[in-house]
Amino acid sequence: MEGVAWRAGGWPVVEDIALHIREGETFGLIGPNGSGKSTLLRLIAGVLTPAAGMIRLDGQAQARLSRRCAARMVAFVAQQAETSERVTVRDAVELGRTPWISMLAPFGGRDDRVVTRALQQVGTAALADRYWHGLSGGERQRVHLARALAQEPRILLLDEPTNHLDFIQQLSILRLVRSLGVTAMVALHDLNQALKCDRIGVMQRGRLVACGPPRDILTPDLMARVFDVRGHFVTDPTDGHRFIRFTLPEV
């Protein structure tokens, strides 16, 4: 991203974003509500068009890519992704194969295997014949992730992927993403989850104010300045794992 900006009603939502995501890394995007995280992901996904600047995907200008070519490269899972209620889980995941099929190359055996693998990766294989309207919020989120994986993307964009997930699923979701071997950009609210990313970018009022390894970036000063909380690292004596403990600032 080079000088990327986007405005709504004349008001800047994202301003002057310059960022290079490394191939194969899991990059966490953090910031308070309204800081521009979701908008930035939508710009990268091509859902929104930048008002200024340029986005390149694998060195190619995003604006010059066809929708089919872009969809083969990038998969996006939004916070509030929806699907027709009258489809089964497997039908919904098969939609991820759309960029790869055509009249000359219809849905075939390889596509079927890719869909099955995607369902298995997110633990939804047992739900394959269920209808969408009968799923819980967490199940729907996992099905949308499976649909994105069925695209076989090189770049995976996830907007708050742990929303609606129960505790064990929250713990496993980033581990799953890291295991896929794709370049991933993940918007997160939980700063302890962000610690598991290779690098993080901190958004504040539409701007990228910090970028780097989580433990270098998430200092007490930054957490107080950007998130208005007191945070400091604590070491778990049982396994030596470090995590952030938060308290409200003193009034």
Image: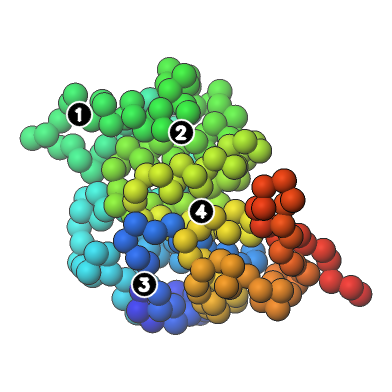
Quadrant in the picture for the N terminus:
bottom left
The answer to which quarter of the image holds residue 169 is top right
Where 11 sits versus 63, above or below?
below
Judged from the image, the secondary structure of the residue bearing numbered disc 4 is strand
Disc 3 residue type?
His
Is the C-beta separation of discs 4 and 2 under 8 Å? no
Which residue is pictured at 38% across the width and 81% down the height?
A: 3
- Whole-percent x, y for residue 85 in the image: 48, 28
- Quadrant location, the C terminus: bottom right
Residue identified by numbered label 3: 20
Q: Nearer the viewer, mark 4 or mark 2?
A: 2
Label 4 or label 1, whichever lies nearer to me, is 1
Mark 1 = which residue? 110
Q: Which of the numbered marks, if any, corresponds to residue 122?
A: 2
Asked if residue 249 lies left or right of residue 89, the reply is right
Secondary structure category for the residue under label 3: loop
Q: Which mark is residue 35?
A: none
Question: Tag 1's secondary structure?
Answer: helix
CA gap between label 3 and label 2 equals 28 Å
Mark before the other along the chain sequence, 1 or 2? 1
Mark 4 or mark 3, earlier in chain: 3
Measure the C-alpha gap from mark 4 to mark 1: 29 Å
Find the distance from the CA under tag 3 to the CA under tag 1: 33 Å
**Residue type of the residue flagged with mark 4:** Asp
**Badge 1: how crowded within 10 Å, few (<14), some, or many (20+)?**
few
